[in-house]
Image (cartoon, rainbow, N blue to C red):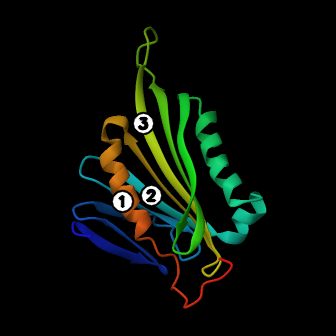
Amino acid sequence: MSGYEFFRIYGFRTVYPVGWKIELDPKSERSEGSATFKSPEKARIVVSWGPLEKAKEKYSSLEEHARDSINRIKKDRKIKKVELIQTKKVKVNSHKAVFSHISMVFSVRKLLPFGKGKTHEREVRSLHLYCKPSMRYFVVYGVTASDKSVQQGRVFDNIIESFACHKAKANPTNQ
């Protein structure tokens, strides 16, 4: 995969495009945290993780976890419209995962009290997965302007395809 470099921390790894910056949340640790990959054009893809037990206490399933993420976006007062483009079950590093792709329209308030605010279109791709071997959940998401969606989609796909949340076993079962 030319044009990409490896990123590895706390037992998981992925790739990111050469020339992108990485910001690690200073509070990050092995059990919980996030890393943000930023392009020179300000596109962002975030990998966040946390204790699997915490996710399982809050959600009855991986699918519910993914749905709740979309519902939280819909409830944001700045969001005017949300459209689900695609949701599907995929395999990532031997795990069942949920991929979602949505478009949204949000408004930015004007400084003056009169007049309309501007609206912007963005697309969000997300991936949710539960990793029993590492006892963590992972959420990968990227937000981009709609006109940059295809390029961002390729980068997102490469990050997901190369994602490894634990060392592979010879015979992975029930993960």
Task: Name the amino acid type tagged 3.
Answer: Arg
Q: Which residue is mark 1?
A: 37
Neighbours of disc 2 within 10 Å: few (<14), some (14-19), many (20+)? many
Q: Are marks 1 and 2 in contact (CB under 8 Å)?
A: yes
The image quarter containing residue 77 is top right
The image shows residue 16, relative to residue 118, as above or below, that is below
Q: Is residue 41 above or below residue 117?
A: below
Disc number at residue 160? none
- Compared to residue 146, the image places residue 35 above or below, namely below
> Mark 1: few, some, or many residues within 10 Å (few <14, many ≥20)?
some
Q: Earlier in the sequence, mark 3 or mark 1?
A: 1
**Marks 2 and 3: in contact by CB < 8 Å?**
no
Q: Helix or strand or loop: what does disc 3 sit on?
A: strand
Residue 2 left/right relative to 82? left
Q: Amino acid at mark 1?
A: Phe
The foreground one among 75 and 96 is: 96
Front: mark 3 or 1? 3
* Numbered marks: total: 3
Residue 126 picture location, percent across and down:
51, 52
Q: Which residue is mark 3?
A: 122
- Foreground mark, 3 or 2, reads 3
Q: CA distance from mark 1 to mark 2?
A: 6 Å
Quadrant containing the C terminus in the rendered view = bottom right
**In the rendered view, would you say 80 is above or below 139?**
above
Q: Which residue is mark 2?
A: 46
Q: Where residue 53 sits in the image (x, y, percent)?
A: 72, 70
Q: Is residue 145 left or right of residue 31?
A: left
10 Å crowding of disc 3: few (<14), some (14-19), many (20+): some
